[in-house]
Amino acid sequence: MEIEKEAENILNKFSKVLDEIPDLEETQYIVDNLNRTREDVNEQSHPDKILRNAHVDKNNSVVAEKGKWTK
């Protein structure tokens, strides 16, 4: 019984404190570095350099190991 009264007293005090907190519409950010973008730059690719070390079969197809997580 005494614990219930104390709990109710605590909840009432907490409720009063919550009523004093003002409602805010949105959060303001101090820094302006949100949603920064960069310019797309087309870099030259060199498939011959990439394929130089690749394993190929007799049909000149690249042979790669199947991922262990796949079935």
Image (spheres, rainbow, N blue to C red):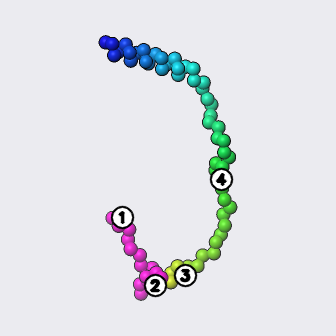
What residue does disc 4 label?
36
What element does badge 3 sit on? helix
The three-letter code of the residue at mark 2 reads Asn
Q: Which mark is residue 70?
A: 1
Regarding residue 71, the answer to whether it shows in the image is yes
Marks 3 and 4, how far apart at CA:
33 Å
Q: Is residue 40 above or below residue 47?
A: above
Q: Which residue is under mark 3? A: 49
As measured in the structure, the alpha-carbon distance from the residue carrying label 1 to the one carrying label 3 is: 28 Å
Mark earlier in primary sequence (4, 2): 4
Residue 61 seen anywhere in this rendered image of the structure: no
Say the numbered circle drawn on residue 60: 2
Give the magenta-colored segment's residue range.
53-71
Of the two numbered discs 2 and 1 in the rendering, the one whose residue sits closer to the viewer: 1
Mark 4 touches mark 2? (CB < 8 Å): no
For marks 3 and 4 on the same chain, the one whose residue lies earlier in the sequence:
4
